[in-house]
Structures are given as structure tokens and as C-alpha cells.
Image: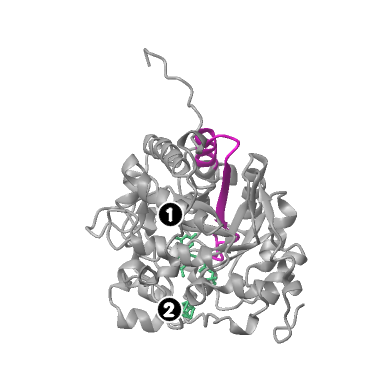
Amino acid sequence: MADKKTAKKGDFKNLLSPIEIKGVEIRNRIALAPMNTLMSLDNRGYVNEQILAYYGARAKGGCGLIITECVLGTRLAARFPYTTNLHCFNTSHLPGLFEVAETIHAFGSVGFVQMSIGFGRQGHSHTGEHPPAPSVVPMMIKPELMPNGFGKAIEAHPQMIERAMGEMPYEMTVAEIRGEQDEFANSCRFAMAAQFDGIELHAPHGYLEHQFLSPITNRRTDLYGGSLENRMRFMLEVYMKVRESVGYDYILGVRMSADEHLPGGITHEEALEVARTLSALGADYIHLSDGSYEALKYFFPDEDGAMLEESANFKKAVDVPVICPSVHDPALAEEAIASGKCDIVSLGRQMFTDPEWGNKVAEGRIDDITRCLRCNECLMRTASGLPVRCIRNPNTGREKYISEYHRPPQKLTPVTKMRVPPKLPEMKEDF
Ligand SMILES: Cc1cc2nc3c(=O)[nH]c(=O)nc-3n(C[C@H](O)[C@H](O)[C@H](O)COP(=O)(O)O)c2cc1C
Ligand code: SF4
């Protein structure tokens, strides 16, 4: 392992080496993890200059891959956001998302958009409307399973309680499930037309796809509940419908929790089986995470590299690239790639603290990296309904005021050479 004090450029040759996914070359193994920063500021779901500069800063700072925050992909999903989220379900969302992709590309990075079919019982109507879910099982966050600092934040910010308690969900009908899947698959065509290089399906952390998978939240007795085969049906149908909608030549990956870490929840072995099935169906990569809102400390680990052993198991189970989050130490990230525990590391909070992490690693300036304290001030702000800030980086959340993060001039791709979704089978006249 490279010593922090004497690190040289060559010490990170695996981390800095390119990787190709379906013909798209990513210049290194460093990804910005998807993070909803609340920078969209309202519930209309459109991109703004701050969002563009936020992604610009991370692409300029050396992330070979930028994965966007999760974008809500159906009209129903958008009625139950986290607090504020970007949307993608009609053509009015296309121009803003195109500008995100263009900004990422202008700084030489590859961009994947994380698309969500909904948050289920973890969403919030803010008006007391019941959110859709597999079954009527309300959410209840347990303080002992919360990460660093959250107990105090709940005392200080009463609005956090709303997120901790959740709203009473209603059970989705089979017709509604199918309707949501179809609308979502169509929305993914808009995301592709916005010129992202790939789509990541958002299935971890106790959100809707995870809720169908988990025996804790899925109590159904129909074809979507019971056995693992039935519980994974919703996720596989979403994957297949999106796959057919964006085509087999386009990158389509899945983010999922490696383990629910709750008694009676999704086990690590079950998660491995789901990943194996997705990979057999042609998923192009698996992006791991862990836990859910009710096991939040696994979702936001207090320790570096906490998911690496789980990641190593996924690497053995699937033959597609595996992305592992939360490895902030460059030496540990290099070792993880070199030893085959993962193919790409995705950095979340560390990228709030220092968007130049990748460039500093490439230049061997390891001691210049401003390290994330894992204090969760950033997260507690978003959980309180405020846009993200970082205690160690005054520029986080204010990138739009910094001109070097604005996208540089770029050669335009003629519209005839742009990425377009494949033609869908023609509808019959009498349909
Ligand atoms: C403010 C914030 C928002 C997040 N939003 C998302 C999201 O939209 N989608 C997602 O898959 N993960 C989300 N995450 C989880 C991160 O992608 C990442 O897995 C997690 O923060 C652990 O990595 P880290 O230790 O590098 O922060 C979010 C994390 C934070 C801190
Ligand atoms: S506020 Fe900054 S230092 Fe603290 S956890 Fe968030 S990113 Fe890390």
C-alpha cells in the first residue's frame, strides 16, 4: 500500500487507469457518488446554474465518472420527493438535463444519470397524501441505527422527525405497478436523449425497488411477494422494461444495497443473487451501497472502506464492473482496485469536502487533500430540508459564484450524430 507521506503519481496507477464500459472509456476509476444536494431548491424538478457548477467542479476536479443525484422518473414519484429532487418524465425536463450532460462532457468526464422510479414509503408528500408502496408498512427510523451526529440534529431540527417517521403508505395495485414501470421506462428515453452516457437505476437504500425486495416492507401475497423470485420481480421488470426502451447498446447499471442489515430484511446472499440475475440479464455494472433509512449508519458509514468486503463478494458473483462507495483514503482506494475488490470507487461526502480529490491524487499531492470528517453536517442539513453545505469547504453549494467551475466552450456534436433512443415496436392501428 502506498505511504501517504511519500506518495508519488505511480503509486496510484490502478486508481488512475482507464476503464471501458460498453465502448465508453472512463479516464480513471474515480466516480462522484450520486447525491441529492437539494440544490434544485424547489419541487418543480428543473436544473439551475448552481447544479451545473456543482457537477462542473467535480468533473474538473478529476472524477472520470459523474453519477448524478437521483432524478424522479414518473409523475407519481415526483409527488413524493425526499425534499426537492430533479425530475425527468416529460420533454420540458430535457434541456436542463442536457446542460448537465454537456457540462460533464466539457470537463472530459463521462456522465451517468441516476433514475428513480420512486421512494415509496420513504417519500414525502408534504401535504399528508399517502405514498405508494408494496404494502402498508410505515417507516420508523431507529436512533441506535443512525450515523454520527444524527441524534443531536433531530433534537435541534424538529422537521427531521417528519423524515424519521414517514407517512402511512398505501398498497400499489398490479395495474398501478405496471403503469409506473411503463412510464418510467419511457422517461429513461428522455434521460438518454439528454446525452448522458448511461443510466443508473436507483434501487438501494430502502426506496421503492428495495421495498419490493425486502420481506420487511413487502408483505404481498400476489406475484410480487413471498419468495425471493417474487420479491425481485418488480426490480427485474423495471430493469427489462428500461433495457428494451433504451436498447442493448446503451449503458444501463443498477445501484442496490449489498445487505439490508435488519433482522428479517434482505440478506447479503439474497442481494448477491439479485446482482447475479441482473448481470445475466445484461446489466452493465453494479453500484453498491448498503442499508436503508431504517439502517442509516450502513448507508452513511462512519468508517472508511466499510463496504469493501461486501464489494469483494459481488466481484466474485458477477462478471461486470462493481462500483464501491465510501473509500476516501487514496491508498485504500488504490489497494481496493489493485486487489480486485471493486473496479471503480465512488466518493460522496469526500467530494463535498474536496472536489479536487482526483487531480490531487493524479499529481501525488495526497497531503493537500482536505479530508471529510464524516461528521454528517452536510447530510443533517439536507435531512432538515436545507441545501447542502460542508463544514470544511465553504464553496460547496456556492459553486455557481466560481467561474472556473463554469463549463468551458465545447465543440458541438451535430444533432444527427447525437445519441437517440431506439425505435419502439410500432403500435397497431386497432390497438
Ligand atoms: C447529501 C447526500 C445525498 C445523497 N443522495 C443520494 C442519491 O440521490 N442517490 C444515491 O444512490 N445515494 C445518495 N447518497 C449516498 C451516497 O451516494 C454515498 O453512497 C454515501 O454518501 C456514502 O459515501 P461517502 O462516505 O463517500 O459519503 C447521498 C449521500 C449524501 C451525503
Ligand atoms: S460536512 Fe463536510 S466534512 Fe462533514 S461529513 Fe459532510 S462532507 Fe464530510
**Vertical relation: 62 (above or below) 154:** above
Name the residue nearer the viewer: 97 or 56: 56
**Vertical relation: 25 (above or below) 369:** above
Q: Which residue shows up at 45% across the image and 56% down it?
A: 409
The answer to which of marks 1 and 2 sits earlier in the sequence is 1
Say what amino acid the circle numbered 2 marks: Cys
First to last magenta residue range: 236-265
Q: Which residue shows up at 52% across the image and 44% down it?
A: 235
Say what amino acid the circle numbered 1 marks: Val
Name the residue nearer the viewer: 254 or 15: 15
Q: Position of residue 395 (x, y in %)?
A: 41, 76
Q: Secondary structure at mark 2?
A: loop
Q: Secondary structure at mark 1?
A: helix
Examine the structure image and report whether residue 335 is included in the region drawn in magenta: no
Q: Which residue is mark 2?
A: 390
Q: How is the image coloured?
A: one colour
Q: Is residue 133 visible in this depiction of the protein?
A: yes
Q: Considering the image in quadrants, where does the N terminus appear?
A: bottom right
Q: Position of residue 317 (x, y in %)?
A: 72, 52
The local crowd at label 2, few if under 14, some if 14 to 19, many if 20 or more residues have their Cα within 10 Å, is: many
Q: Residue 30's image quarter?
A: bottom right
Q: Is residue 130 left or right of residue 18?
A: left
Q: Position of residue 11 (x, y in %)?
A: 75, 74
Q: Residue furthest left?
A: 127
Mark 2 Cβ inside 8 Å of ligand 2: yes
Q: Residue furthest top?
A: 430
**Vertical relation: 336 (above or below) 187:** below
Q: Which residue is mark 1?
A: 100
